[in-house]
Image (cartoon, rainbow, N blue to C red):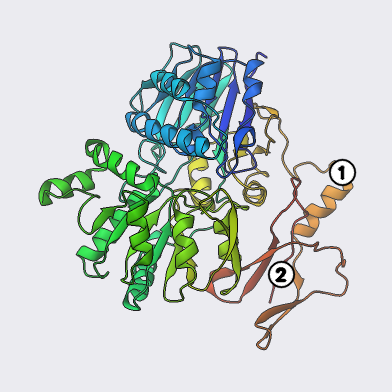
Amino acid sequence: MSDLHFLGLGGTAEVGASSYLYLLPEGNLLIDAGLRPGALGEAALPKLELLREHPPAVMVLTHAHLDHVAALPLVTREFPRLAVYCTAATARIAATVLADTLKVSADQGAPLFDVKAMKRALERLRVVEPFTPITEHGPAFTLLPSGHLFGAVSVDLRSRRGRVFHTGDFSNVATPTTEPAFMPAEEQPVTAVVSESTYGDTLLPSRKEQVRAFVTAIQETLRGGGKVLIPSFALGRAQEMVSILLSAMAGGQLREVPIYLDGLVRALTEEYEGMLDLLPAALQNAQRTSGRAPFLRSPVERVEDARMRGKILASRGPCIVIASSGMLHAGTSPLYARVFLQEVENALFVVGYQDAESPGRRLLELQRGGEVLLPDGRGGRELVPALCRVERFYLSAHADRGGILGLLGRYPSGKVVLTHGEVSARNNLRTYLDTKRDVSLPAAGEIVPLQDSGRRRGAFVSDAPRRLAATRERHTRRQVQVQYDDEQHALVVKLPEDLSPNYFGEGDYTLEVVRGKLTRIKLGQREVETEPAEPALSSTE
């Protein structure tokens, strides 16, 4: 195949098992090889078997999250001479993540690799600084800081057939532990952009306001004598939470209580302490001026064993626990959740992305007093009543829809491929792009050309009658009545009689209120199929 093509092995219409292959005349470039969190054995893997047909000439790790790095030993076992490029931080952290993956999968009875394969994978890592062009393997590429996580990068790929910008996971907002994604001062025209779309259907609230609300909610719980559980991604998010809590305690906004770190959170926070010279300058300066460790200082304590964990669970005093996993599907966080959830004075605060099938997502959808199925720590699961306060705070390390569109604006292209997002997120984001760019939403295993085909949604009057009618109806405004039923606590939308009863199918809908008051209402169905539904009603009142 001599042209410029993209092949998603995983992480296309999902957040998990990210692995992307670029098919180039100079040689194939593989980006990432991760696992699906919560899945076991072969079900956790991307379609790595496709690499036998399209062997990579070189590989890049964008960052060290499990869903991007944990299948690396399987790739290097198949291609033992493969060079794998990443930043220094990613190389350091990947060793800890792979060791934990091996331990957890072995405990579950479904190990995907052994210690020997893990060591060989780590030996293939080649550390490179961002902005350094790599040209000796055929495809030429440069790594660019992407925010999101300590050491994370995007990939600027250049071939004689064109230039591609691969965003990787990125964030355009600074956090205590990560600088924002690199944004070029001038537009960089490219042939194609391959972008993540995790929050492609969401405009996230102000991070500053979310941090303030988060700290306030914790303070309210502690004042009531309760404990707080923060299920967290062990890498990146947990260290950010520690930094936020320590700053709030130092500033008097938060009562000083023990902050316990458990599971992989403990090991990775220790890794962060050892890489202070690579962390943002603000953290380095704070350590130099105060002489104190940035994360592992009083009142932070590491949970060393099951006995200490048992004492925390049995204690009556207020405290804060940060434990992995962030979605409550494994690790030590479910052990705390099973106890904390059943006491009304406690709180469980969600601070990261929740997969559609994760216990964390189901917990957020429950009414207080409902039951959620959690791992029991013995290989099984049990129903646990959720009696305590459960709340979500948007402290994500992913860009929202506005941030994604902002970065794509710096890389004008004829072609866009959307990956790393659920169906609704990809479909929603596509509606903001597909009248200007040729947009593809590939399935795992599908080869997609990265040259602009010239197709635009609604761009040609010769389009099929059904699509043309749908395009016209999308722009049609209808007068509707909206009433609030205070007995049922429901907003009732009365549709015009001439509107087809089949216009709205079954599914969950979101209601968007524009400019903070009820001047215009926009109803949009959250997609549940791979094909986009017809545009939903846009109405005025």
Q: Which mark is residue 434?
A: none
Quadrant occupied by the N terminus: top right
Mark 2: secondary structure: strand
Q: Which residue is mark 2?
A: 539
Residue 464 circle label:
1
Q: Give the residue type that dot 2 points to.
A: Ser
Q: Quadrant of residue 159?
A: top right
- Total marks shown come to 2
Q: Residue at x 50, y 39 (%)?
A: 107
Residue at horizontal 53 percent and vertical 58 percent from the top: 203
Residue type for callout 1: Ala
Measured Cα–Cα span from mark 2 to mark 1: 26 Å
Q: Is 496 placed above or below 155 here?
A: below
Q: Is residue 315 left or right of residue 284?
A: right
Answer few, some or many: residues within 10 Å of disc 1's Cα (few below 14, many 20 plus, some between 14 and 19): few
Q: In the figure, 99 relative to 522: above or below?
A: above
Judging from the image, what secondary structure is the residue with disc 1 in? Answer: loop
Residue 96 seen anywhere in this rendered image of the structure: yes
Percent across and percent down for residue 60 are 47, 25
Q: Position of residue 493 (x, y in %)?
A: 74, 76
Q: Is residue 458 left or right of residue 405?
A: right
Q: Are marks 2 and 1 in contact (CB under 8 Å)?
A: no
Residue 239 x, y percent position in the rendering: 33, 49
Tell me which residue sits at (59%, 55%) in the image: 381
Q: Which of the 4 image quadrants contains residue 490?
A: bottom right
Image quarter of residue 275 = top left
| Closer-to-camera residue (375/207) | 375
Q: Residue at x 24, y 60 (%)?
A: 247
Quick one: label 2, few (<14), some, or many (20+) residues within 10 Å? Answer: some
Which quadrant holds the C terminus? bottom right
